[in-house]
Image (tube, rainbow, N blue to C red):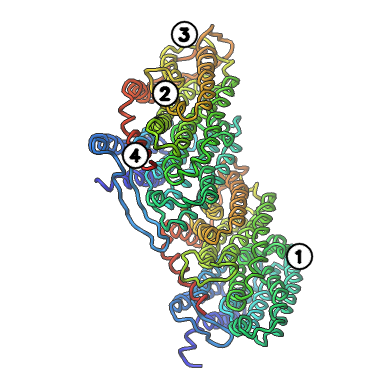
Amino acid sequence: MTVDTLRLLLPEIILLLTGLVVIIIDLITMRRVNDTVLAGVSIAGMLLAALAAFSLRGIPPEPVTAMLAVDGFATFLMVAVLLGMSLVVLYSYDYMKQYGKNRGEYYAFLLAVALAIVLAVGANDLLMVWLAMEFLSITSYILVSYLRGNPRSSEGALKYFLYGAVASSVMLYGISLIYGATGSTSLNGIAQIVSGQGAIEGARALGFTAIVLLIVGFGFKTSLVPFHQWAPDTYEGAPTPITGFLSTASKAAGFALMIRTLIVALPSLSVDWLTVLAGISMITILFGNLVALRQSNIKRLLAYSSIAQAGYILMGLVCVPQVGFQILPFSDFQFNGINGVLIYLFGYIFTNLGAFAVVIAIENRTGKVEVKDYAGLIYRSPWLASLLLIFLLSLTGIPPTLGFWGKYFVFGAAIQIQFYPLALVGLIGAAIGAGYYLNIVRYMFLMPADDDEKIGVSRAISVALAVTGVAVILLGLLPSALITWATESAQFLASL
Amino acid sequence: MESWILPLITLIPLLGAIVLLFIPRDREDGIKLAAIVISLIPLVLSIFLLVDYYTRYIPAGGGMQYQVTLYTIPSLNASYAMGADGLSVPLVFLTTLLTTLGLYYSRHTIKKRVKEFFFLFLLLEMGMLGVFVSLDYVLFYIFWEIGLVPMYFLIGIWGQPKDRPRYAAIKFFIYTLVGSVAMLLAILGIYFETGTFNILDAAAAQPWAGNLTVASLAFWAFMLAFMIKVPAFPFHTWLPDAHTAAPTAGSVILAGVLLKLGAYGIIRIVLPTFPTAFNHWALVIVGMGVIGIVYGAFICISQTDLKRLIAYSSVSHMGYVMLGLGAAAFGISRVQDQNVANSMAMAINGATLQMFNHGLITGGLFFLVGVIYERAHTRDMGQFGGLSAKLPYFYGIMMLVAFASLGLPGLAGFWAEFFTFRGAFDLVTVWAAIGVIGIVATAGYILYRIIQSVFLGEYDSTKVAHWTDMNNGEESHEPTDMARFEKVVMWPLVILIVLLGVFPNLLLNFFNQFATEFVRIVG
C-alpha cells in the first residue's frame, strides 16, 4: 500500500477521522460542547470527503484493494450521497434541538452512515457488499430509534430491524450459493468463472436462486415492492431528517450495490435478473403510486412516493443496452440506463431532501405532518410553498426541473431497447403520481389557511432550502455538465 | 435582429415575470401596469414579424425563416433551435395579442392575489410562444410542459368557487400530463430512429417509413398528446370543466391559444413526420373530428350556462380542424391526382384558418361572457332576456362575434369553414356531409340560445336583482352597457374579424404557402 493508494481512500479516511473527532470533542468537553460545533465539523468533513471523491472522478478505474473499487461510478455516487448527507446533518441540527443533550454520538452515527455508503458504492467483493450493507443497516437502525421516548420511533426501528435482519440473512445465503458455485467472492472473479468456457453447470443452475436471494437484500434496502413493507412505518416513526436520509442516500447505496453486483459479477446471467427486475420495477411503480394516492400523512406519502421513485430508478438498470438479454458495451449508447440511474439518483436526492426540508420546517414550527395542515401554506410562507411546489414538480418529472432529466434518461433507455410495456407503466405511474403530488399543491395554493400565523424558517433549514432549490432549478435548466459526468461515470463501470 | 427576434419574443415574458417578483405585493396597480407594458414588447415584435414575413418572405416563397441555434447540448444532442414559418408567425401574433388583451382585461377584473396572477400569465405566454417557434423536440417538449403549471393555477386559484375550479384544474393537468408523457416517449423513439432531435430533419428522415406498426404507435402517442390538447372527441371532457372554471382571461387564453398548441403539433410534427401512418388512420381522425363537430354543437343547444356553451362550441369548432387535417391526410395516398392535391391544400388551409379565427372569435366570446358575468354574477341564460334594449353596445358586438362564430360570410369564421368543407367534400365526402349537420346545429345554438334567450324578448327586472356597474364597481338595479376597458379589449378582435372576413388573403397567404409546400413534399 503506497501513498498513492491512500489517496484513493481519501473520502473514507476523511469520514472516519471526522467521526472520531466528533466523538472526541464531545467527550473532552464533557458533553457540554455547542451543537453548532458538532454539526459544523460533521458537515465540513462530509463536504471535504465529497471534494476528495470529486477529485478522484477521472482516475482510471482500479481496485484499490481486492475488495474496494474507486471508479467513476463510485465517485459520482459518493459526491451525490455526501452532499445529501451534509443536508441531513443540517436538518438534524435544527430538528434535534428539541430532543435532549446527548447528541455527540448522533453526529458520529451520521458520519458512520456516510462512511458505510461510501464503502457500499465501491464494494467490489461480495463480502464487502454484505459488510457495507450490514454496516449501513445497523447504524440506520440506531438512528431510526433515536427518539427514545417516542413509541412510533421505536416501532419503526423494530420493524426496520426485523425486516433488515431477515433480508440480510437471506442475502447472505445467496452470497454463499454464489461462493459455493464459483469459489470466488470477488465480483470480477465471479464474472470470469460464470462466463468462462469451463463454467460449472452448477453455477448456472444455482444462479437464478442466488440472484433472487440477492435481490431480496437489495430490494429491502431500496424499498422495492414486495420488500418495502417496513418503509412506511419506519419513515413515519423515524426522526424526519432520518426519514430524509432513508429515502435518498440509503436508497442510493442499495442501488449502487445492486448495480455493481449484477452488472460486474453476473452479466452472463443477465437473462435471470433482467426479467425479475423488470417485473419488480413495474409492480413497484404501480403499487407505490397507487398507495401513495391514499395517504394523508405527508411523511407516509413521501414514503410511498419514494417507493414509486425507486421503481423508476430500477427502470434504468432493467434497460441497460442489450440484445436478447446480452448486455452490450455502454460506450456505444447515449442512453445506457445506468447514466439514467445516476442522473435520476442525483436529482432525486436533492429533490426529495428539499421536500423534506420543507416538511421539517413546518413540523418544527407547527408540529403538524398531515397534508391537510398544508392548507393555505402560500399565505403563511410563500417561500416554503413555492419551493415545495418546485420539488413536487421535480418529483413528478415536469421540465425544466432536475427531476425531469432523470425521467428523461430512464424513459429514453426503455425506448432505446424497445421495452414499451415498461415505458407504458412508467407513463401510467407518472399520471397517478401527478395526482397526489398536486393534491399537496392544491392544499398549499388553492385552499384557505386554517391558521394565519406565519411560519418562520430557521437558518439551517434556509440554507438547505437554498441549496436544494437552486440545484433543482439550475441543474434543471442547465443539465449538460451533470449529464456528461453521469454518462462518463457509468461507462467506467462497464469497462471494469 | 433577424436571428434574435424569436428567442427575444420568448424570453421577454419570462424576464418580465421575474421583474414582477421584485415589485412589492401591495403595489397592485404597479404590478398590473408593468405586466401589460412588458406584454406589449412581444406584441410589437410579433407585429414586426408578421409584417416582415409578409413583405419579405411570402413573395419569395415563404419557408422557415429567422432560424437560430443559440446553443447545443452535446450530451443530449439537443439544441436551442428556433424558427418560424407561415404557420407559426400568425399564431405567435395571436398569442401575444390575446395575452396583452387578457392582461389588460384582468387589470380591471382580477382583485385577489394579483401578483401571482400576472406572474403566471406571463410565464404561460412564454410557454405558448416557445411551442410555436421551437425547432427542436426537447425544446418543444420543455415549452409544452411549462404552460401546464401556470394554467393549473389560473384555473384553480381564480376560478369561481361554484364551478369546482380545483377539480377542473387537476383534471386539466392530469389529462395533459398523460398526453405529454406519451409524446415524450414518441420523441425519444424518433430520436433513436433518426438520430436527431431537430423537428424538420426528423420529418425529412421519415422515421419508420416502411414499418407501419411502429410508425402507428408513435403516431398515436403524438396524437394522444395533441388530441387531448385540441381537444378532439373523446378526449374533450376536461375542456368544459376547465373553461367554465377559469377566470375570463384564462378562458380566453385557453380557448384562443392553448387549444391551438395541439392543432399546431399535429400540423408541425405529425403530418410531415408520419404521412403514411396518418394516411392509414386518417378516417379515424376524420371520424373523431366530425363527431366532435356534431356532438359538440348539439351539446351546446342543451346548455343553460352561457360559458359552458361557449366551451362546448370550442369542441365543435376545433372539430373542423381535425376534419380538415384528417381529410388532407386521407388524400396523401392519392396525391398524384392534381384535384386531390388541390383539395388537400384547401383542407389544410381551412384547418389553419380555423385555428387562427377560432382564437379570435372564441377569445372574443369568452371576453363577452366575462362582460355579462361581471355584471350579473350569473351565466344562467334563463336569468337573462331582453338585454338588447338595455345593453345595445354589448348586443352589437356580441351579434357580430357570434355571427362570425356561426360562419356568416363576410366575417372571418366563414372562410375557415368554407375551405375546410371545400377540401373535405372532395376527399371524405360522406363524413363532410355529416359534418354539415354541425353547421346547422351551430346556427341553432348561436341564434336560439345566445341571441334569442339572452338579448331578445322582454327584459325582466326581477330575474337578476343586482347588476354591477363596471365603470365604477357600484351595484344598481339596472344593467349598464360596456365599460371603456371592455370596449378597448373587444375592438381589436372585432376589427380583425371583419378585416379577415373581407380580405381573407391577408391571412391565407401565410398558411397557403405552408399547405402547398406540404402537399408538394408529400407528392
Q: Are marks 2 and 3 in contact (CB under 8 Å)?
A: no
For the residues beneath circles 1 and 3, the answer to whether they share a chain is no
Tell me where residue B309 sits by quadrant: top right
Circle 3: residue type = Ala
Circle 4: residue type = Glu
Q: Nearer the viewer, mark 1 or mark 4?
A: 4
Residue B167: % across, % down: 61, 37
| Residue at 33% over, 37% down | B86
Please rate how many residues cluster around mark 2, counting C-alpha atoms within 10 Å: few if below 14, some from 14 to 19, many from 20: some
- Residue B389 is marked as 3
* Mark 1 and mark 4: Cα distance apart in space: 70 Å
- Badge 4 marks a residue whose secondary structure is helix
Residue located beneath label 2 in the image: B418
Residue B128: % across, % down: 42, 41
Q: Nearer the viewer, mark 2 or mark 1?
A: 2
Of B272 and A120, nearer the camera is B272
Residue located beneath label 4 in the image: B517
**First in sequence: mark 2 or mark 3?**
3
For the residues beneath circles 1 and 4, the answer to whether they share a chain is no
Q: Are marks 4 and 3 in contact (CB under 8 Å)?
A: no
* Mark 2 and mark 3: Cα distance apart in space: 34 Å
The chain carrying label 3 is B
Circle 2: residue type = Phe
Q: Is residue B24 visible?
A: no
Q: Nearer the viewer, mark 4 or mark 3?
A: 4
- Residue A155 is marked as 1
Of B191 and B110, nearer the camera is B191
